[in-house]
Image (cartoon, rainbow, N blue to C red):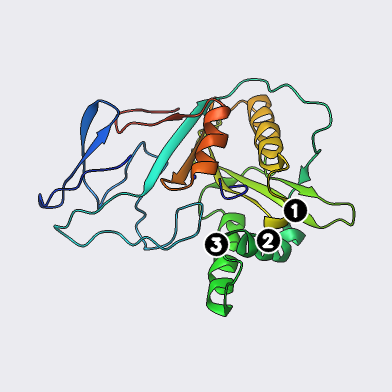
Amino acid sequence: MVSPIHNNHAATRAPATLPIRRFSNEATYRPPRSFFMSQLRVFPRSPECRTLSARVIPPPAEGRSIMVPLISLAALLSPQEAKQGTSVPRPVESTDLAELTDLYLRSYHPEADRLDAEKAAGRISRIFAGTHGTPIPQASLAIVNAVGQITAAILVTDRHVGSATPGTAYIAELFTHPDHRRQGLAEDLLRHAMHVLHTLGHRTVAVTVHSTNSAAMALYLSRDFRRLTQRAGVD
């Protein structure tokens, strides 16, 4: 996610079914299952976080309707023009795990306690381990400052498991240190990652953001991301 980058869904009491208004269409959403496509999920099988802000959002209880706080976006990939004066990121390395965990925690929970730190470590470790899709090291990038400290990072995975062709690239995380926001670091990372993904043969990239994260929404919309509907598909 980057600076944490940011629909109101009307809920009814219908058993295990939630009507969701997407633009002008009504779609029926069944909470216990996948939200869209075969690869990207809003409600996972385990009550782990799948949001940019690392908040835990457990699956709804059987027969209950809830307000869905997440929005799924996707963009078609194409060559990205480099801008003069922009930051040049480097690939994320396995040795960055501890530093990325600390940066992730500072980005979303500046006053975090030990429990939050453990959750952050688990989140980043699972991405590195491939729990959220096969990591794409060429597109998982970090920007460092003059003394080599990571100030922003993007972690990207491939959700097309078991296929020889590139699937839908998924932005698992994009985040920036609070002291380095509003410097265009997130946009630089996103542009570089999208360009790399295009050169690797990926056709689409997707991301899930929290509905209240207006900064994230603005960033992705500026890069031609569009909202996915339940029937939409990306190959």
Q: Quadrant of residue 124?
A: bottom right
Judging from the image, what secondary structure is the residue with disc 3 in?
helix
Q: Is residue 202 above or below residue 188?
A: above
> Is label 1 or label 3 in front?
1
Residue lying farthest to the bottom in this orientation: 114
Q: Cα distance, mark 1 to mark 3?
A: 18 Å
Q: Is residue 232 above or below residue 89?
A: above
Q: Cα distance, mark 1 to mark 2?
A: 7 Å
Residue lying farthest to the right in this orientation: 147
Residue drawn at 55 percent across, 45 percent down: 5
Q: Nearer the viewer, residue 41 or 153?
A: 153
Answer with mark 3 or mark 2, whichever residue precedes in sequence: 2
Check if mark 1's residue and mark 2's residue have beta carbons within 8 Å. yes
Label 3 sits on what residue type?
Answer: Arg
Answer with mark 1 or mark 3, whichever residue precedes in sequence: 3
Drawn side of residue 20 relative to residue 96, left or right: left
Q: Is residue 158 visible?
A: no
Q: Is residue 116 visible?
A: yes
> In the rendered image, which residue does mark 3 sit on?
123
Image quadrant in which the C terminus is located: top left
Residue 151 is tagged as 1
Q: Nearer the viewer, residue 159 or 190?
A: 190
> In the rendered image, which residue does mark 2 sit on?
103
